[in-house]
């Protein structure tokens, strides 16, 4: 019995000793080797060989698998920083464009227009007209514009209002026009008579014939007209002679032969026609 069982054991050991083992196998566990198919075992042996050598010393040129057949330039990270940068820039541009496009600058108030970075505020100085605002006036908001830096006059559409803007950029509702030959708003009203006469191109003096009593009768003294106010030159005045008085004071009245009612004055109702003094 003992000899019978020992014989196969010796044969097995001799067989194992005679089989050539790979010289470099890696660290495969017995359980992993046992669970692998013959094809997997062969592939594993080829890939775990060091420096592409097999146990027979033959150098292998391992075939590239699907995971290794790629061009590194096609990736977006690491070594291909140039392409990554280009892609990033394009995305930023797209996002910026998407951000700017929905913004409607027209019609925004001054504070909102200034808060929106892509919008431009527009200011101008009004040429004199009745009720004009003085100083820099906010006119409107618009998107960015490519325009010159020279001063231009712009007319507000549908009105007699004209403004001087510091450049050719302007909000919607304004059209480039010729500057009127008048002064800017409220630049004439504070001038004295002498100062007003020195500004013939921009300002003009307004005179009134005072209502005086002569021999118990009230008349308008056209021989001794009085300076009332300096106003912007070129303003349109009614084609009749109104009777004017200072706002809030009807005790003193004047005929205004120019037809103009200057700032600080108003028309005064009179019970009857006042003739000129003889």
Image (cartoon, grey):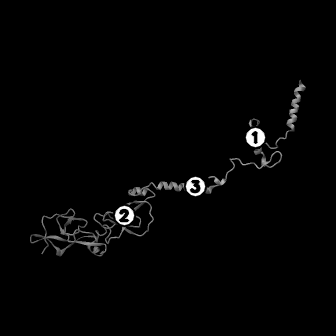
Observer-side mark, 1 or 3, equals: 1
The crowding category of the residue bearing disc 3, from other C-alpha atoms within 10 Å (few below 14, some 14 to 19, many at least 20), is few
Residue lying at the far top of the rendered structure? 1
User: Mark number for residue 8?
Assistant: none
| Residue 174: image tag | 2
Sooner in the amino-acid sequence: mark 2 or mark 3 = 3
Give the camera-side residue of 33 and 152.
33
Residue 42 lies, with reference to residue 83, above or below; the image says: above
Pointers 1 and 2 in contact (CB under 8 A)? no
Q: Give percent across and percent down for residue 162.
A: 33, 66
Examine the rendered structure and indicate whether residue 64 appears above or below residue 169: above
Label 1 SS: helix
Residue 168 placement, left or right of 131: right
Q: Give left or right: position of 94 versus 28.
A: left
Determine whether, in the image, residue 198 is placed left or right of residue 214. Answer: right
Query: Seen from this angle, which residue lies furthest right?
Result: 3
Image coordinates for residue 116, horizontal then vertical, percent: 44, 56
Q: Residues within 10 Å of mark 1 (few under 14, many from 20)?
A: few
Residue 262 appears at what percent x and percent y? 24, 67
Name the residue located 28 percent from the left edge and 73 percent from the top edge: 196
Badge 1 or badge 3: first in the primary sequence? 1
Of the 4 image quadrants, the one containing the C terminus is bottom left
Which one is nearer the viewer's eye here, 14 or 239?
A: 14
**Residue in the picture at 38% in, 63% down:** 123
Q: Is residue 218 left or right of residue 75?
A: left
Q: Which residue is mark 3?
A: 87
Query: How many numbered badges does the structure rendering display?
Result: 3
For the residue labelled by badge 2, is the local secondary structure a helix, a strand or a loop?
A: strand
Q: Which residue is mark 1?
A: 39
């Amino acid at each position: 019995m003992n000899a019978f069982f020992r014989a196969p054991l010796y044969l097995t050991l001799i067989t194992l000793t005679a089989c050539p083992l790979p010289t470099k196998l890696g660290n495969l566990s017995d359980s992993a080797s046992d669970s692998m198919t013959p094809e997997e075992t062969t592939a594993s042996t080829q890939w775990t060989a060091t420096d592409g050598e097999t146990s027979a010393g033959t150098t292998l040129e391992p075939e590239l698998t699907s995971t290794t057949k790629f061009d590194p330039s096609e990736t977006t990270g690491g070594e291909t920083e140039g392409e990554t940068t280009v892609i990033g820039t394009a995305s930023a541009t797209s996002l910026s464009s998407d951000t700017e496009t929905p913004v409607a600058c027209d019609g925004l108030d001054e504070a909102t227009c200034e808060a929106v970075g892509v919008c431009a505020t527009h200011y101008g100085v009004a040429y004199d007209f009745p009720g004009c605002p003085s100083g820099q006036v906010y006119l409107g908001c618009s998107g960015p514009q490519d325009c010159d830096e020279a001063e231009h006059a712009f007319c507000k559409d549908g009105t007699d209002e004209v403004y001087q803007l510091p450049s050719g950029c302007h909000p919607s509702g304004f059209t480039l026009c010729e500057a009127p030959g008048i002064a800017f708003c409220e630049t004439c009203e504070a001038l004295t008579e002498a100062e007003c006469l020195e500004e013939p191109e921009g300002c003009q003096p307004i005179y009134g014939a005072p209502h005086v009593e002569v021999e118990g009768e009230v008349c308008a003294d056209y021989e001794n007209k009085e300076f009332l106010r300096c106003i912007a030159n070129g303003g349109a005045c009614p084609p009749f002679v109104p009777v004017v008085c200072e706002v809030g004071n009807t005790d003193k009245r004047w005929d205004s032969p120019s037809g103009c009612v200057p700032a600080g004055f108003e028309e005064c109702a009179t019970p009857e026609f006042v003739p000129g003094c003889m």
